[in-house]
Amino acid sequence: MNDDDEEFHCRDIKNDSKDDNSDSYEDEDEDEEPFKKPTDQKTDSEVIAKEDDKIELSKIKESRYNSKVEDDNTDDEEEERGYQEKEKQPQESEQGDREYGHSKPHDDYSEDEREESTHDEDETEEEGFIPDPQTHVVTFIYEDDLTEPVLLKDNIFERAKDSLHLDAIPDKLPGREGEKAHIQAFLEPKINLGESGGTLYIAGMPGTGKTATVKEIIKNLQVKRKKSAIKLFRFIEINCMQLSYPDQLYQTLYSKLQFGRRSARPKTSEEALRLLKKRFNSNSAKKDFVIVLVDEFDCLLTKKEQTVIYNLFEWPNKPASKFVVIAISNTMNLPDQLSSRVKSRMGLQRLPFQPYNTQQLESIIKYRLGGLEAFDQDSIQLVAKRVATVCGDARRALEICRKAATIALQQNELDNLVQKVTDTHIDEVFKQFSLPIRRKLNQLSLFEKLFLYCVCKESKRINSLEVVYGAVYRKLQETTLSKGMYCPTESEILQLAGSLGGYKLILFEDDKPINWDHLLKLNISQVDLFYGLEEDEDLQTII
Ligand SMILES: Nc1ncnc2c1ncn2[C@@H]1O[C@H](COP(=O)(O)OP(=O)(O)O)[C@@H](O)[C@H]1O
Ligand SMILES: [Mg+2]
C-alpha cells in the first residue's frame, strides 16, 4: 500500500486501535474497506484555494448548551442512568474527550427545546455550532442601510469572497425545491404522529447540496417547532467519516442521544449496542422523537460485515423506537452492494440528487452574491457551464468563483481599474487549479488519459463517484471504435487500469485482481482532470 493511498485505507490504520473487547465484528474483513469519502479529501486545487484564503469568517459561533438529562421511569432508562453514574469519573471523561475531540457536534435541540424536553440540570460537554445571523451573507448583501458600514467590508471583492465562502450558510438553496419538498414530506408527518419508521436514503455526487438541503429542512422544522406548529423532535448528526471503524457508530449515537455527555458515553461498542437496543425496544412515552442524519454513509460499508447498517435500518422499523434515519451517500448504487439480509430490512425511500446543471449553478452563484456586482455575468456563466459539463458540483463552482475574486482583489490592490471578475480571472483559476494535475497527466500515455476520461464520463452518467470497471472498459472501446482508431485489447486495458491505480490517479475498492464488476473511482477532482486533459490535442480529437 502506498502512502498516497492513506485516505482510501486510513481505516485500516485506525482499526489497529480498535478495542479488542468492543464487539461482535471479529470476522470483519479489514481488507474490504469501502472507498473513503472524497468530499473532505483535499485535492491539490483545494489546497491552492485554501492557501489564499486569508479571511477567517466568524460565521459560525460556538455556544454551550445547558444539557439536561431526561427523567424517565422505565427500567431501561433506569439502567442507562445507572450506567452513566458508573462512568462519572473525571479521568475517563478526559480520555473520552480526546477520543472524540475531533468530531464536530451538531444537534439537537434549541435551548428552548431542551428546557421543554428535559428535567435535570447537567453539565454538557458538547458544543453546538450555530450560524450567526449577524454575519449571514444574504442579509449583508441586501443591506440598504449604508449608515452601518461596520458590517460591510469596503472592497467589493472581499465581500464577494465572504458570500461565496463554503461555510457561509445561505438562507435558501436554489435548485433543490423538489428534493426539499420530498424530505419535508417524509419527516413532518412522522414528527407529528410520533411515528417511527423508515429510512430516507439520499445519494448523489459530492457538492450536489445533499447535506445542505437536509440541514435546511431541519432548520425550517426547528422554526416551525418554535412556533409550536409541529411536535417536538430532536436532530442528531453523525458523520461516518469521523468514525474510526463502523461499529463506533453505536457509541457515537448513544452518546449523542444522551446530549453528548462524556459520562454517558459507553466504553465499548458492545455496551452501546445493548443500550441502544433497549432504548429502541422500550415503550417509554417520554422518549423523544429523534431524527438522525447519518452523513457520508458509504464509509460504513464493508462487504462482509454489515451489521451496523442492518441495525441502523432495523431500528426505525421498531414501532416504539420513535426514530427516523436519513442516510446520505455519495454512492448511488450502495443499496445494491448490501447483502440481501440488510436489504430486506431497509424499506427505504431513495432520493437521488442529480448534479446541478448550468442554469442551476448560475442561480446558486448569483444567489450567493446577492446584488453584489463583483462579477461579469459572462464569467458566472463560464464557471457554471464548465463545472456542469464535468460534475455539477456546487462546492467546486463556488471555490472557483471565490478564487477568481481573490485574483481580482490582488489585481485591484495594484490597479484600481480592475472592477469586476472577468473570464480572464476564471481562466487563470482553471490554469492554477489544474497545474499539479497537468504535470501528472503529461506523463501519461494517450490511452491512459482516455481511460481517465471514460471514468469521469461514466461517473457523471450514473451520478456516482464509484463506477464499475466493465462500464469504463466498454466506454473506452466504444470511443476508440467510433473514431476508427486502434482499440486496445482486453489485457492492454487491464494494464492501463493497473498502472493508473499505481499512480494513484484511480482507486480500486480492494487490492484483489481487477474484474469486470470491480468498483473504482477517480482520485483527482473531475474538474481538474477535465481541464488538465484539454492540453492534449490528440485526445481532444478523440473525445
Ligand atoms: N442549491 C445550493 N445553493 C447554494 N449553495 C449550495 C447549493 N447546493 C450546494 N451548495 C453549497 O455547496 C457546498 C456543498 O454542498 P453540500 O450540501 O455539502 O454537498 P454534498 O453534501 O452533496 O456533498 C456547500 O457550501 C453548500 O452551501
Ligand atoms: Mg455532504
Image (tube, helix red, strand yellow):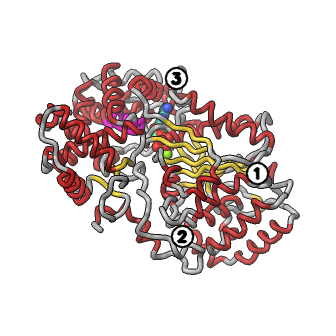
Front residue of this view, candidates 383 and 282: 282
Mark yes or no: residue 195 visible: yes
Label 2 sits on what residue type?
Arg
Check residue 148 for magenta coloring: no
Quarter holding the N terminus is bottom left
Task: Please state which amino acid type lies under the numbered disc 1.
Answer: Lys
Give residue 104's quadrant in the image. bottom right
Q: Quadrant of residue 362?
A: top left
445 vs 361, nearest the viewer: 445
Is the residue marked by circle 2 packed among few (<14), some (14-19), or many (20+) residues within 10 Å? Answer: few
SS state under label 3: loop
Q: Which residues are magenta?
A: 393-403
Mark 2 to mark 1: distance in Å?
31 Å
Residue identified by numbered label 2: 98
| Residue 405 in view here | no
Marks 3 and 2, how far apart at CA: 42 Å
Q: Is residue 189 above or below residue 334?
A: above
Q: Which mark is residue 142?
A: 3
Front position among marks 2 and 1 = 1
Does the magenta stretch mainly form a helix, a strand or a loop?
helix
Q: Give the Cα distance between marks 3 and 1.
A: 41 Å
**Above or below for 541 versus 144:** below
Percent from the top left, x then y, of residue 407?
27, 35
Decide which of tag 2 and tag 1 comes sooner along the chain. 2
